[in-house]
Image (tube, helix red, strand yellow):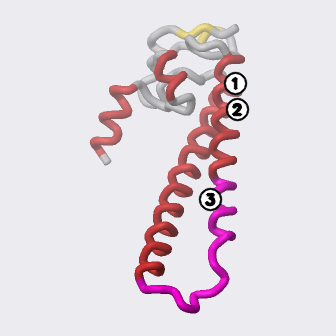
Amino acid sequence: MTTTSASGDRAGNATLCGMDEARARELLAQNRERIERSLAELVVREEGDELSDIDQHPADNATELYDDELDEGLADQLREELAALERAEQRVEDGTYGLSIESGEPIPDARLEAVPWAERTAQEQERYEQRG
């Protein structure tokens, strides 16, 4: 098992900082399933739209446009989460899961439990988001 110091120096070659590898894989797999299921539901909902615009009130069109844009926004967010999850799975393979990609500092297990694909500590993520 690889151990990692707070500075991010690795000794050995194949595991995680803090969180157990099996737990990390379990969390990532659960979230992958949730994200993929949600994306599939959005596609099914999109395919279930009405076949005709005949006799539709203009407000119905506005509602459909709003719903379509909302669904597209949700799909974009889910695709971003899936990409982040895939990067996290790669970090598990590389033995760097649980370490910030920015500083190399350990990401607290509580954060990884809440956001298994987290790439930074909460403070680093906040600064990253403020920078835009």
The mark nearer the N terminus, 2 or 3, is 2
Helix, strand or loop at mark 1: helix
SS for dot 2: helix
The mark tally for this picture is: 3
In percent of width and height, residue 54 lies at 58, 91
Residue contact at pointers 1 and 2, CB within 8 angstroms: yes
Distance (Cα) linking label 1 and label 3: 25 Å
In which quadrant will I find the N terminus? top right
**Callout 3 environment at 10 Å: few (<14), some (14 to 19), or many (20+)?**
some
Q: CA distance from mark 2 to mark 3?
A: 20 Å
Q: Which residue is mark 1?
A: 26
Identify residue for label 2: 29
Q: In the depicted view, which residue is nearer to us: 4 or 89?
A: 89
What span is colored magenta in the figure?
39-58
Task: Kindly identify the residue that appears in the image at 65 percent across and 10 percent down.
Answer: 2
Decide if residue 106 is in sight here.
no
Question: Is 56 included in the stretch rendered in magenta?
Answer: yes
Query: Horizontally, is 117 left or right of 20 in the view?
Result: left
- Name the side, left or right, on which 77 lies relative to 14: left
Residue behind mark 3 = 42
Mark 2 or mark 3: which is in front?
3
Amino acid type, mark 3: Leu
